[in-house]
């Protein structure tokens, strides 16, 4: 009996050590709290208890090319048993019991700590830098998914996309690509601007949000600037109009924008006019463009520095590319055919992406380069390789040495 108990304990240690490196970043206490506040608990002993399902969802995100059954088997997620591998039929019910709420809680809890801490530690003129933009993600074409999420229009608006679509809007710490907050709903039932309304309050004080001109709105500008020491920056649309109040420098003006009656009718708290700064610039042989911003002090925020900074907005586009092209491997759709499964999987994808990015940030700090100088493709490859090797070769008790080895390998990805 003692020998059998030792074997069970050793097997459990093996399963636990498979995830030691990620558990260093995702504390057990957070997982327990996520399950508690979501009302999820394992009431009886199961081969796939709730805590392990969390790691299964993360494994699905990080190992896109593997079937879910292989993730359970290769990453030693299930509790040891003399009944052999977990039956494939047991996995969907286990995911359904956990649902999406614990993954959403874990993402929000970790993003609040990781992303905001990074942005606060790498400021521009004393301001933490954020970007906000949207994207879409395809989901499997089940009746449930299409009914809930809808689809987008194609061509001239006469057709529909071949897959149901989820619209995602995210707030990102630009200099680390860590996602600070996110919202998503069906692309057929909501817009980026509607989703973004829930994110403006997530921007902390002493910060600058660089936003896409698709969010050009007096209500958005007012929402950002009216709460604390927060600023915004965007590119003007071709039909944008304003009145020049004062020349601040060459191609640099203080201007007044009139808020439309329609906008004020929707939100009576909006002022009749807004004073902003308009900086005109030309890049190479391209037509001139105008940056509008609430950074009004030309001495503290020089125009040339603002023009250079604006192009860091592209970092959020690169972040979306890392998620969709490399993490999800550009496959047609994510895996889940149920609505709750889709929500669970997307929160898991966002959390897994941040886990990879957090590891890259820490390595970048060790070698004294910006996190964006580390190859995401290379880092993801090394982390996946490390997971595979843990499942087959490594012995319990070596997680610290493996973590140091992984970080040493990531140093070569600058």
Image: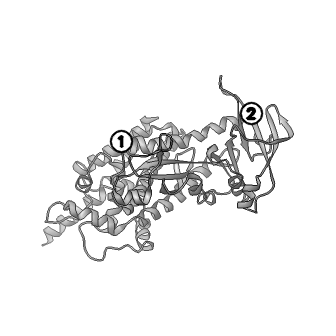
Colouring of the image: one colour
Q: Position of residue 326 (x, y in %)?
A: 40, 41
* Residue at far front of view: 158
Viewer-side label of 2, 1: 2
Residue pointed to by mark 2? 280
Calculate the distance from the C-alpha at mark 2 to the C-alpha at mark 1.
Answer: 44 Å
Q: Is residue 143 left or right of residue 304?
A: left
Q: Secondary structure at mark 1?
A: helix
Which quadrant holds residue 46?
A: bottom left
Q: Is residue 68 left or right of residue 221?
A: left
Q: Secondary structure at mark 2?
A: strand
Q: Earlier in the sequence, mark 2 or mark 1?
A: 2
Q: For mark 1, does the 10 Å Cα neighbourhood hold few (<14), some (14 to 19), or many (20 or more) residues? A: some
Q: Position of residue 43 (x, y in %)?
A: 30, 77
* Residue at far top of view: 285
Pick whichever, 61 or 29, lies toward us: 61
Q: For mark 2, does the 10 Å Cα neighbourhood hold few (<14), some (14 to 19), or many (20 or more) residues? A: some
Q: Is residue 339 left or right of residue 153?
A: left
Q: Residue at x 13, y 65 (%)?
A: 83
Pick whichever, 321 or 195, lies toward us: 195
**Residue 23 visible in the current orientation:** no
Residue 318, placed above or below residue 263: above
Pick whichever, 317 or 108, lies toward us: 317
Q: Residue at x 47, y 59 (%)?
A: 107
Q: How many dots with numbers?
A: 2
Q: Residue at x 74, y 33 (%)?
A: 280
* Residue at far bottom of view: 43
Residue pointed to by mark 1? 382
Q: Which mark is residue 110?
A: none
Q: Position of residue 218 (x, y in %)?
A: 72, 52
């Amino acid at each position: 009996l003692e020998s059998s108990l030792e074997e069970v304990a050793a097997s459990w240690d093996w399963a636990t050590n498979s995830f030691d490196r990620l558990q260093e970043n995702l504390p057990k206490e957070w997982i327990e709290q996520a399950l508690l506040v979501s009302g999820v608990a394992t009431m009886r002993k199961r081969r796939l208890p709730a805590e392990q399902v969390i790691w299964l969802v993360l494994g699905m995100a990080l190992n896109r090319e593997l079937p879910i059954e292989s993730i359970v088997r290769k990453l030693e997620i299930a509790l040891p048993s003399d009944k052999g591998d977990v039956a494939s039929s047991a996995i969907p019910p286990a995911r359904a019991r956990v649902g999406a709420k614990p993954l959403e809680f874990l993402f929000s809890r970790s993003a609040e700590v990781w992303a905001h801490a990074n942005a606060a530690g790498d400021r521009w003129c004393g301001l933490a830098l954020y970007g906000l933009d949207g994207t879409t993600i395809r989901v499997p074409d089940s009746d449930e998914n299409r009914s809930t999420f809808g689809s987008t229009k194609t061509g001239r608006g006469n057709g529909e996309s071949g897959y149901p679509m989820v619209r995602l809007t995210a707030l990102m710490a630009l200099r680390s690509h860590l996602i600070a907050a996110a919202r998503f709903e069906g692309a057929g039932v909501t817009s980026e601007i509607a989703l973004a309304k829930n994110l403006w309050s997530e921007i902390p004080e002493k910060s600058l949000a660089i936003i896409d001109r698709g969010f050009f709105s007096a209500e958005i500008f007012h929402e950002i600037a009216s709460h604390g020491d927060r600023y915004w920056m965007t590119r003007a649309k071709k039909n944008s109009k304003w009145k020049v109040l004062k020349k601040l420098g060459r191609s640099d003006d203080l201007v007044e924008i009139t808020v439309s009656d329609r906008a004020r009718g929707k939100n009576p708290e909006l002022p009749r006019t807004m004073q902003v700064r308009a900086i005109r610039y030309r890049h190479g042989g391209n037509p001139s463009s105008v940056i509008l911003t609430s950074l009004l002090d030309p001495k503290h925020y020089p125009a040339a520095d603002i023009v250079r900074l604006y192009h860091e907005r592209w970092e959020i586009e690169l972040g979306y590319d890392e998620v969709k092209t490399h993490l999800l491997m550009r496959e047609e759709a994510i895996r889940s055919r149920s609505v709750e499964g889709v929500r669970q999987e997307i929160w898991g994808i966002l959390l897994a992406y941040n886990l990879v990015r957090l590891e890259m940030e820490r390595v970048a700090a060790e070698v004294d380069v910006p996190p964006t100088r580390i190859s995401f493709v290379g880092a993801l490859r090394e982390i996946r390789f490390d997971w595979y090797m843990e499942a087959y070769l490594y012995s319990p008790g070596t997680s610290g040495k493996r973590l140091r080895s992984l970080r040493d390998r990531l140093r070569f990805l600058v």
